[in-house]
Image (cartoon, helix red, strand yellow):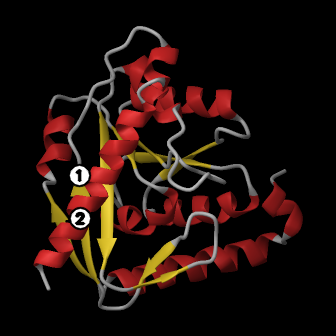
Amino acid sequence: MSDTAQAAPDWKLRAIIGMGTALLRALAATWRLRVHNPEVVADARANGRSIVLILWHGQMLVPLHVHRRQQIAILISEHRDGEIITGIARAFGQRAVRGSSSRGAARALLGLARELDSGYDVAVTPDGPRGPYRVFAPGALVAAQRTGAPVIPIGVAVSSAWTLRSWDRFIIPKPFARVSVVYGEAVVVRTERARDAAALTPEFQERMADAIARAEAQLGART
């Protein structure tokens, strides 16, 4: 039984998930959203290969909305809040792989590889589930190295948002906020060993920073 199931009755968990899903849908309907270079994703998928999307934990709400009803499996932690995120993700037509770098890491890595081999894309927050803030853990790159799936960074910028006092500085874009999403270059991890893939984390951390900088620039160009 999960930590959340032990901590709260099923009805309470379902209520939290329902309210969270309804709130996200209501907010997203008002966002002035622009997605830049979506052809990166389309081109990577065009050859029939699954992809690995990477995004920071604190920016997950916008990509969750953008990629709703797509064949995506999201790596979600086994901590308590993971049950809530799993329920909301399922409401948006996605599914979960449970685990993280700190709990269930080997099982999570195997789950990601299985999803990629089955034709699903996967989405990973490489600084989740407990940080450090925007420090890249190598799990997504190892899964990509094992399966040959290209890795695509996602950068998000918003004009106004609520920022939670959590380790990830989780952002919730406010109603009618301007929201920009940028996809970085699709990169295939061409190494023979998992530890060589892990050594690429500084490069991909820079790629994440670049995607966010470009999203912020696009947002500024719209003011």
Q: Is residue 18 above or below residue 69?
A: below
The x and y percentages for residue 15 are 68, 80
What residue is at 87 percent from the left and 67 percent from the top? 7
Q: Is residue 162 above or below residue 70?
A: below
Work out whether 100 lies above or below 8: above
Secondary structure state at the residue bearing disc 2: helix
**Crowd rating for badge 2 (residues with CA inside 10 Å; few <14, some 14–19, many 20+):** many
Residue at (37, 68) in percent of width and height: 62
Residue placed furthest toward the right: 6
First in sequence: mark 2 vs mark 1:
1
Q: Where in the figure is residue 200, as x and y percent of width and height?
A: 41, 27
> Which quadrant of the view contains residue 161?
bottom left
Q: Which mark is residue 215?
A: 2
Q: Please, what is the three-letter code of the amino acid marked with disc 1?
A: Tyr
In three-dimensional space, the C-alpha distance between marks 2 and 1, rounded to whole angstroms, equals 9 Å
Seen at 77% across and 78% down, the residue is 12
* Residue at image coords 50%, 64%: 58
Question: Depth check: 10 or 210 in front?
Answer: 210
The quadrant holding residue 92 is: bottom left
Say which amino acid is labelled 2.
Ala
Task: Mark 2 and mark 1 in contact? Answer it, CB < 8 Å.
Answer: no
The answer to whether 191 appears left or right of 125 in the picture is: left
Q: Secondary structure at mark 1?
A: strand
Q: Please state which of residues 138 and 71 is positioned toward the viewer in this rendering.
A: 138
Instruction: Look at mark 1 in the image and give the residue it sits on.
Output: 183
| Whether residue 46 is visible | yes
Res. 121 in view: no
**Percent x, y of residue 177:** 30, 86
Judged left or right of residue 74, residue 51 is left
